[in-house]
Image (spheres, rainbow, N blue to C red):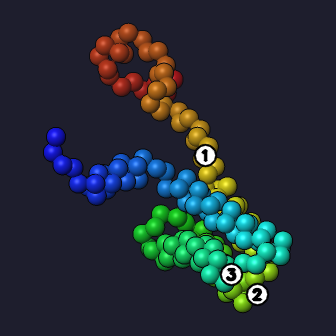
Amino acid sequence: MPNENPYTSAVAAYGNTAASVDPRALEGTILLKSAMKLEDLAKRLKAGEKVTLVEKGDVLEYNQKLWQLFVSETINPDHPLPQELKNNIATLGMFVFKRTLELLADPNPDKIQALVEINRNIAAGLLKKPAAPPPVPGALGKKKPDMPAASQADNKPTDSLA
């Protein structure tokens, strides 16, 4: 059996997994992960626990980097989201950045809660399965009305609208 490069195996495994993951679900999951980290930080601060600046910075930086990715996509003219939605994401991102700076200066647990709620609400929208579109008349899979045998045989168009 030939020696297999572990890095090649890892890249192949990542490629297979990444191709099968829904990007919306991935973004939603990451937002929830960040919300949990933020909420844990808020609980620790509220309980009076001594939280180091590095610990606070790590949690806030994780969330900020996530939002930097979202905001950077809003300036991509080829991104398929409607411009109004891109504008809303950019506005939320600016709020997240401003609040993050405020929290680095004064880590108030109540102010962290706004970031938790934003992440959870966006994640809920991303993880929600889109409703199936209503069936289109004449779409594939819908049984066609029965036609007289003569019409089927010679397949000639008729002037009838029935």
The CA span between labels 1 and 2 is 38 Å
Task: Compare residues 10 and 95 and report the one nearer the observer.
Answer: 10
Q: Nearer the viewer, mark 2 or mark 3?
A: 3
The CA span between labels 2 and 3 is 13 Å
The answer to whether the residues at label 2 and label 3 have Cβ atoms under 8 Å apart is no
Question: x, y (%) of residue 149?
Answer: 38, 9
Q: Which circle marks residue 52 in the picture?
A: 3
Task: Compare residues 70 and 150 and report the one nearer the observer.
Answer: 70
Would you say 128 lies left or right of 20 here?
Answer: right
Q: Residue at x 28, y 58 (%)?
A: 7
Kind of residue at badge 2: Asp
Would you say 103 lies left or right of 86 here?
Answer: right
Kind of residue at badge 3: Thr
Q: Residue at x 29, y 51 (%)?
A: 9
Q: Residue at x 40, y 49 (%)?
A: 17
Query: In the image as oriented, which residue stretches furthest toward the front?
Result: 50
Q: Which circle marks residue 129 in the picture?
A: 1
Q: Nearer the viewer, mark 1 or mark 2?
A: 2
Question: x, y (%) of residue 63?
Answer: 61, 72
- Quadrant that contains the N terminus: top left
Kind of residue at badge 1: Lys
From what the image shows, is residue 109 above or below residue 158?
Answer: below
Helix or strand or loop: what does disc 2 sit on?
A: loop
Q: Which circle marks residue 82 in the picture?
A: none
Q: Residue at x 32, y 20 (%)?
A: 155
